[in-house]
């Protein structure tokens, strides 16, 4: 095995071990969620007309009649087997199967939103940084402020009205082709693009004052080569930090965006499960989002190493 690869794998194992307490805390909080919410989830699932015998029978089938510590132990046993339990609304439906059927749609939307954010932020941030204090810089700051000021539940309906209803350029809702992804991705990526624009602008301004930039220019490199080959690469480390942290925000924001555009992802499944009081489904959805967020932060740590070899991966 290549020594460098051995170090990377060892560091990966170390990071994963450090994440285990976080995973335990998340699983515990998600488990307790069903016990701290008001009301009886079993009776809510069966309806007001359900008899006590029917409620007791469903509790027995799902294991809710056992002591809390035993339910907690059984929940962990199920997780280790890849079993998140059954839906309260449809006991024949496994929670994990339903989540896995929706998870790809959420990842598709999250990465599309990330792509839109970078597509807007990189050229806008670089242009603003190269023209510090100019009209272009001020205009970029206004665009960034506008993006931060418009939450998804405002921007989404606005985009639907303008581009779907007024000009009939894009479909309103659903997931039946690439064109259905555009408006949700723009809605999800707009706020992130505003944050990234300001980050990239600050990084470019800081890096342009470094000695290596003057050396590169003295060697005869063109301005675009200096910016995109040297300045932008060295200035991406704080941006990667924000991306890693904001990926979880994208997943959380997807809950609103998926509801607005009827996107059949994990976010909409979570909202539907909450409305139906299907607490095992809510537990599974929150757990999946939390674990994805933890994994995204682990991936961010290793992205540092790719951008700057001087950073020790350990």
Image (cartoon, rainbow, N blue to C red):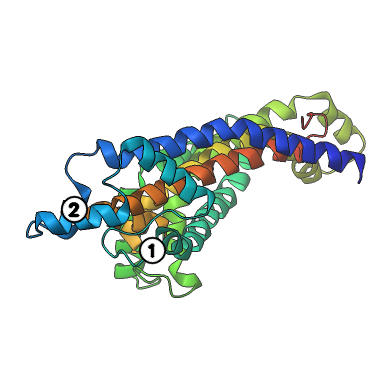
Q: Are marks 1 and 2 in contact (CB under 8 Å)?
A: no
Viewer-nearest residue: 110 or 170: 110
Instruction: Identify the image quadrant of residue 183.
Output: bottom left
Q: In the image, is 46 to the left or to the right of 212? A: left
Q: Position of residue 29 (x, y in %)?
A: 39, 35
Residue at coordinates 83% horizontally, 44% vertically from top-left? 222
Viewer-nearest residue: 184 or 145: 184
Of the residues under marks 1 and 2, which one precedes in the sequence?
2
Q: Residue furthest left?
A: 49
Viewer-nearest residue: 172 or 249: 249
Q: How many neighbours does mark 1 have within 10 angstroms: few (below 14), some (14-19), or many (20 or more)?
A: many
Residue at coordinates 37% horizontally, 70% vertically from top-left? 174
Q: In the image, is 207 to the left or to the right of 174? A: right
Q: Is residue 243 in sight in this rendering? A: no
Instruction: Identify the image quadrant of residue 159.
Output: bottom left
Dot 1: element:
loop
Q: In the image, is 240 to the left or to the right of 186? A: right
Answer above or below: position of 269 versus 128.
below
Q: Position of residue 280 (x, y in %)?
A: 34, 51
Q: What residue does disc 2 label?
A: 56
Residue at coordinates 41% horizontally, 63% vertically from top-left? 98
Q: Position of residue 254 (x, y in %)?
A: 41, 52
Q: Is residue 294 in sight in this rendering? A: yes
Instruction: Identify the disc placed on residue 263.
Output: 1
Instruction: Identify the disc placed on residue 201.
Output: none
Dot 2: element:
helix
Q: Position of residue 193 (x, y in %)?
A: 51, 44
């Amino acid at each position: 095995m290549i020594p460098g690869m051995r170090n990377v794998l060892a560091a990966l194992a170390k990071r994963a071990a450090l994440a285990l307490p976080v995973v335990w805390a998340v699983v515990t909080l998600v488990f307790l969620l069903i016990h701290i919410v008001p009301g009886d989830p079993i009776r809510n699932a069966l309806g007001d007309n359900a008899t006590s015998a029917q409620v007791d029978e469903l509790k027995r089938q799902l294991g809710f009649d056992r002591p809390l510590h035993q339910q907690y132990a059984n929940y962990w046993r199920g997780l280790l087997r890849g079993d998140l339990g059954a839906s309260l609304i449809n006991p024949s439906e496994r929670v994990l199967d339903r989540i896995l059927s929706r998870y790809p749609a959420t990842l598709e939307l999250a990465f599309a939103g990330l792509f839109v954010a970078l597509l807007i932020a990189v050229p806008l941030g670089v242009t603003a940084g190269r023209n510090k204090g100019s009209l272009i810089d001020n205009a970029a700051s206004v665009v960034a402020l506008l993006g931060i000021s418009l939450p998804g539940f405002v921007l989404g309906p606005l985009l639907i009205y303008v581009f779907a209803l007024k000009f009939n350029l894009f479909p309103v809702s659903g997931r039946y082709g690439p064109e259905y992804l555009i408006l949700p991705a723009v809605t999800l990526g707009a706020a992130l693009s505003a944050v990234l624009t300001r980050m990239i602008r600050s990084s470019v301004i800081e890096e342009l004052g470094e000695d290596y930039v003057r050396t590169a220019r003295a060697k005869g490199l063109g301005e675009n080569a200096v910016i995109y080959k040297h300045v932008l690469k060295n200035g991406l480390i704080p941006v990667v930090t924000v991306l890693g942290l904001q990926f979880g925000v994208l997943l959380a924001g997807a809950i609103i965006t998926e509801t607005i555009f009827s996107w059949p992802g994990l976010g909409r499944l979570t909202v539907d499960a909450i409305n139906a009081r299907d607490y095992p489904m809510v537990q599974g959805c929150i757990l999946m989002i939390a674990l994805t967020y933890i994994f995204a932060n682990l991936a961010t740590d290793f992205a540092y190493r790719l951008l700057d070899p001087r950073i020790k991966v350990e």
